[in-house]
Each structure stands twice: as C-alpha cells, then as structure tokens.
Amino acid sequence: MSNNPQLAPKHLDCSDLDRHMGRPLTPWSLKESLHNNDFRRWAQAMHYPNLLHYDAEYAAIGRFGRLVAPQSFTIAAAEGHGACPAAVGHIPDSHLIFGGDEWWFYGPRLFAGDRVIHEKIPYDYVVKETKFSGPTCFQRGDNNYYNQDGVLFAKQRSTSIRYRRDAALEMGALDQTEDPSWTDDGLNALETRKLEYINMMHELGHGRRRWKDVKAGDKLPARVFGPHSVASFATEWRAYLMNLWGSAYRNQDSDPVKLGFVGPMAGWEMDPVEERTNPENTDGAYIGPSRGHLFTRWARYIGMPRPYGYGASMGAWILDYLAGWAGEWGCVVHCNSQYRGPAFSGDITIMTGEVTGTTVDEQGRNVAQVGCKMANQSGTTMATAKAEIELPV
C-alpha cells in the first residue's frame, strides 16, 4: 500500500446496484422503419465491404433476393449500444467502457421496412481488482431484440466495465499517448493485406461454405483494417441510429448524473428535452460520456492515452468477420466476445480465426466452432471470441 495519500486505494461504491438487478428498463424503439441506406451506412462504418449489404444488384440474385442487414446491425438499432442494462445504478465518480458481448441469434433477419423493439433487463455484477483502475465493477445486462411481429430474433448479454476515473489516472496503465507513424510503403502494404479477406468473400460469392468441408485447424483469412482515426471513429458513431437527431422515442433511464459519471463527462446523451432545444448537446459526439472517443483531452480525462474506438464496434467487427467467412447461407448462432483493450487512433486491427471443431448441436444444427482474435500492429490483443456458426451441409 502506498504511503502517498493521493495514491491511496480508491473505494468503488456499488451499493446502489442491487436494487436494479432483474428489473426491466423502459423498452426502446426507433420512430421509423429500417431502410436499405441504414444497412449501407453501417457496412461502410464497420469497414465491412460485403456486397450483400450494400449492392442491390448483387443481393437481388442471392439467397435473400434483396439487401439484408448484417447480423451485427442489430446493435445499430439499439439504445446505448446495448449497454444500458449493463450500466444501471449509481456508482459515484465513475466512468464506463465496454468489456464484452455475448450474442445469440435465432434465425429471422432484418430487411428494409422492419422495426426493432429493444427490451433491456439488468442481469448481475461483480467487483474485481484490475491493473487499469484498481477496484472495478464488471456489470452485465440482457438485451432482447424483437421485430415488428413480436419475434425474438437476437439476444445480447453486454458487459460494461465501470471504474473510478481518478483511480485509472493514478494507475497509469495506458500511457502510449502518440499515434504510431506509418510510411507510404507501409500504408500501401496494408491495402494489399486488406484484400485477403475481401477476395475471400468475393470468391465465395453466393456459394455455400459447407459444414462437411470444414474441419478443425482450418484457418480463416486475416482481416485487416485501419489505421483508425478520429475520422473513422466519427463515421462509426454516426452509423448508430440512436445518435441521429429525433430518430427514436427517448426515455429517462440513462441520465449520466444519476449513474455517477464525473463532472464534464456527465452530459446527457439522448436527453429527450435538450434534443428539442440544442441536439448537438445530446448526440454524444461533442458533449457527454462518449466524447472521450473523439477528443484527446477527454480521452485522457478518463484514463485513455488518446482517442479510441467503440467497444460495440469491436463486437460488430467480430460478428462481421465470422459472418463474412460463413457466407450468406451460413449464420452466426452464438458468439461470446471479451474486449481487452480498445482500438486507438493510429493503430490497425488484425483479425485472425481458426476452426476449433465441428458438431451437431442440441437443436440439430450443423455448426462450426471458431475461435477469433483481434490484435493491433504490435501484437497487443484487443479482443478474443468463441463462436458457433451454422453452415449448410
């Protein structure tokens, strides 16, 4: 224990959380039906050049006969990236980052004209000691997604990491404050590497990746994108439909002050009252907890060294990586992802995967079991995931 009183261990007061566990929050929905351009904007923001989601002529002759939303798009039609039920309760002087997502998909896909109803139920929490911020709360919440017919098509169990901002600053775990430098040759080499995954999708086209042809040890092609930047992070943020002015029926569940967010980070994103007065104060890009992603000053204020990407986007990258490999006749039915560190400005993301086995699950589905890793150019692990992907026989 330090003798310096300024470095004394910080207490994380989670006493308010218990009363919220298992109590559903207000359901949430967008005001309008989904549009093909929502899918296009999402695929573009997630660096996912799968023709099935943005090229109408290509999609018309495929399995669905029209553009279909990526499986990852579900999170774009949700409130708060799905983290709302994983962030309820007052923790004084705290901030929040994403810690992981577990997804289950039940079959129905999203198309233009569909509606999404988002149901949110706090699940549980645990406090652990971490190198990042000392005592840290890992809180989980369930998100159930229904279409306009009341059909449950997806479930997300989101994990938030809630911590004391001042403790994170004192721990100083994230100290790489400068963006890495990329030469022109290095950037050109990245463009070549990006084609490995893109060409795989094009070569598979409308064909089937068959379960009987897949075996343990098969490597997925590497997916490379970046370097990330404030521009790319802003593009991601603007693709989440919840952030569009006037896009949704707002509610009173997520007031950052009531959650315990610190001072200048406690601006109320999606405040239904302020949105009608000055919506720039409510869309998360400029004011409020999310602005640390886009502004160096505010990133450092909450213990991050420089602008950084969104945890929910990392989850989407994983789902896209797996779904693009599976092809349009496959489906990610389950994926459990843990986020270990964000994508920082200037970094690239390298995704790799391997088939770890094949099986017929309890529902009689032919699934490939796949492990996935996400790392930056230095080999630092950003996320890991294990998934089950249903494939045609």
Image (cartoon, rainbow, N blue to C red):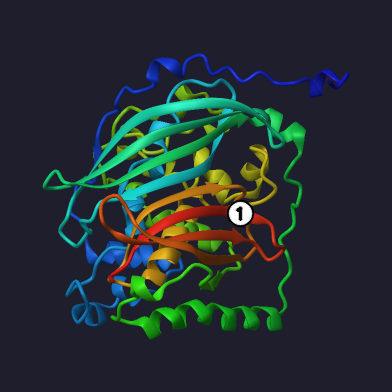
Q: In what element is the residue under mark 1?
A: strand
Residue under the image location 43 percent in, 55 percent down? 387
Identify the residue at image location x=72%, y=78%. 183
Q: Position of residue 315 (x, y in %)?
A: 46, 53
Q: Position of residue 76 (x, y in %)?
A: 35, 52
Which residue is depicted at the point 74% across and 69% down? 181
**Of residues 206 and 305, the one drawn nearer to the viewer in this rendering:** 206
115 relative position to 190: left or right:
left
Identify the residue at horizontal 40%, vertical 15% (top origin): 19
- Say left or right for 133 vs 336: right
Image quadrant where one finds the N terminus? top right
Of residues 215 and 107, the one drawn nearer to the viewer in this rendering: 215
* Residue type of the residue flagged with mark 1: Met
Which quarter of the rendered picture does the C terminus lie within? bottom left
Residue 229 visible in the shown view: yes
Instruction: Give how far across and how far down residue 94 sits, in percent.
Output: 58, 27
Residue 276: name its quadrant.
Answer: top left
Where 344 sits versus 302, above or below? below
Considering only vertical position in the picture, is 349 above or below 131? below
Judging by the rendered image, the residue that carries numbered circle 1 is 382
Q: Is residue 33 left or right of residue 95?
A: left
Seen as rendered, the residue at the extreme right is 3
What is the quadrant of residue 8 in the picture? Answer: top right
Up-down: is 158 above or below 337?
above
User: Looking at the picture, how far across and down is residue 338, in whole percent?
Assistant: 53, 47
Report the front residue among 245 and 349: 349
Residue 241 visible? The answer is no
